[in-house]
Amino acid sequence: MIYMSNAALKCAADVCLELPNYQVIICPSLRSKRDDILGEITDYIPSKAINIHRILKSNSNCYIEFTNGNIIRIVTAHESCRGYKANLVEVDSEVSEEFINTVLRPMEIKQLREKR
């Protein structure tokens, strides 16, 4: 889990363009920030990116889906965001530590490491 910044948003876009089957959740503190974040991420993606399958923005969902199976999902820091899973969770610095520990940390997919 990392704190949200312009560099972190660019990293999420780059990772989703390069790696297969990667899930990213970006968690702003306010819903009003969602559109700005979506705009910033789409600005980082090359204009002729044929690997974007769909961009959805509705009252209940906001995500970018790539043709390689990756998803960048933007969910507001609220109890209703429970249940998602992601390889990377980016969180707004204004989100409380309690919410991070009880709701967001369980979202992270733990990577299995090879035994030596």
Image (tube, grey):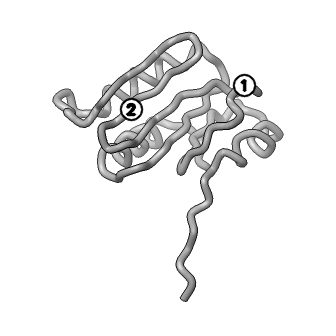
Foreground residue, 40 or 47?
47
Left or right: residue 106 versus residue 111 is right
How many circles with numbers are drawn on the protein?
A: 2
x then y, percent, for residue 93: 66, 35
Left or right: residue 67 versus residue 26 is left
Task: Report which quarter residue 50 is drawn in.
Answer: top left
Circle 2 packing at 10 Å, graded few (<14), some (14-19), many (20+), is some
Question: At 39% across and 26% down in the image, what residue appears?
Answer: 40
Q: Amino acid at mark 2?
A: Glu
* Residue sitting farthest toward the left: 48
CA distance separating discs 1 and 2: 21 Å
Sequence-first disc among 1 and 2? 2
* Residue sitting farthest toward the top: 59
x then y, percent, for residue 38: 44, 23
Left or right: residue 47 versus residue 62 is left
x then y, percent, for residue 17: 31, 44
Q: Which residue is mark 1?
A: 80
Whether residues under marks 1 and 2 lie with C-beta atoms below 8 angstroms apart, the answer is no
Question: At 62% across and 38% down in the image, what residue appears?
Answer: 84
Q: Which residue is mark 2?
A: 65
Circle 1 packing at 10 Å, graded few (<14), some (14-19), many (20+), is few
x then y, percent, for residue 47: 20, 27
Q: Amino acid at mark 1?
A: Ser
Above or below, 108 relative to 84: below
Secondary element under disc 2, as helix, strand or loop, is strand
